[in-house]
């Protein structure tokens, strides 16, 4: 659902007003085909699907570098996201970091509209490293100012990756599957007044205690009761200390 297009003055219809041109193009497609949600279509690779009263189909789909809305072979709109550079003949309005084939200096956390427009002449950055972001620019006849920052390294989401983790226990220096009624998982907790998730592990018993129980059970049935005892802290058998 899109809000009604508001036109403040006729100058907003000028060819260089890219945002208004995109909005009018979308409105024209919806009006021409009377589009409605296509709940019966194949949504496997689609973000959303529409179908017109005349049989036209419009699909919003993800791409390797962003998202686009297409009707047949016609691209209604396209955005780039999640990358610092993209190879495309299209252009981001007002962007000052590009060469003939590539736009670079993009912030992976932002989305940029791509327009079918030529790259402008004038001062611009023709090369940037992959971890550089262009955050602003100001170009005049006498000087050019470019604001740059670096891409923040993406930290792995350990909570999201937890289901892929290999869980187990280490006992007597060896890595073994989960045992002794142990379990590992994700719990919802409160920290600093906020709901958070944490990795946790639980167990109903321990190898040390179980080994002690088994050895004591064997020893108690043996006629030589004073031969062995077990220390749960060391988890090994030793000669039992003398008793009074």
Image (tube, grey):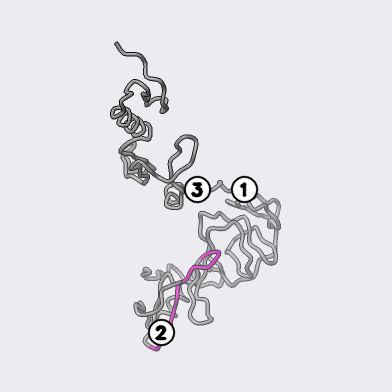
- Indicate yes or no whether the magenta region holds residue 63: yes
Residue located beneath label 1 in the image: 148
CB atoms at circles 2 and 3 under 8 Å apart? Answer: no
Local SS, label 2 = helix
The residue pinned by badge 3 equals 156
Tell me whether circle 1 and circle 2 mark residues in contact (CB < 8 Å): no
Considering only order in the chain, which callout, 3 or 2, is on the residue closer to the N terminus? Answer: 2
- Please, which residue is most extreme toward the front here? 223
Tag 2 or tag 1, which sits nearer the N-term? 2
User: Does residue 38 lie above or below 237 as drawn?
Assistant: below
Nearer to me, 39 or 77: 39
Residue 173 drawn at (x, y percent): 49, 35
The quarter of the picture where residue 236 lies is top left
Which residues lie in the magenta part? 54-66
Q: In terms of sequence position, does the residue under pointer 1 or pointer 3 come before the other?
A: 1
Q: Point out residue 225 in the picture as x, y percentages from the top left corner.
A: 32, 23
Which residue is denoted by mark 2 in the rendering? 33
Please indicate whether residue 13 sits to the left or right of residue 6 in the image.
Answer: right
Query: Which residue is located at x 65 percent, y 49 percent?
Result: 145
Q: Secondary structure at mark 3?
A: loop
Image depth: mark 1 or mark 3 in front = 3
């Amino acid at each position: 659902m899109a809000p009604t297009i508001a036109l403040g003055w006729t100058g907003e219809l000028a060819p260089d007003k890219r945002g208004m041109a995109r909005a009018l193009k979308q409105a024209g497609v919806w009006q021409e085909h009377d589009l409605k949600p296509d709940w019966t279509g194949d949504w496997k690779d689609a973000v959303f699907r529409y179908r017109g009263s005349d049989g036209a189909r419009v699909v919003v789909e993800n791409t390797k570098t962003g998202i686009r809305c297409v009707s047949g072979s016609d691209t209604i709109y396209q955005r780039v996201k999640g990358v610092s550079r993209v190879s495309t003949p299209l252009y981001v309005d007002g962007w000052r970091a590009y060469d003939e084939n590539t736009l670079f200096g993009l912030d992976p956390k932002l989305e940029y509209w791509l327009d079918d427009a030529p790259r402008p002449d004038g001062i611009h950055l023709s090369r940037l490293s992959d971890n550089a972001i262009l955050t602003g620019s100001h170009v005049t006849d006498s000087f050019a100012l470019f604001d740059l920052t670096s891409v923040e390294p993406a930290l792995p989401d350990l909570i999201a990756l937890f289901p892929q983790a290999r869980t187990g226990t280490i006992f007597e220096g060896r890595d073994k599957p989960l045992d002794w009624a142990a379990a590992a998982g994700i719990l919802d907790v409160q920290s600093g007044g906020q709901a958070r998730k944490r990795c946790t592990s639980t167990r109903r018993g321990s190898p040390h205690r179980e080994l002690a129980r088994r050895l004591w059970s064997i020893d108690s049935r043996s006629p030589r009761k004073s031969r062995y005892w077990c220390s749960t802290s060391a988890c090994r058998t030793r000669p039992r200390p003398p008793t009074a």
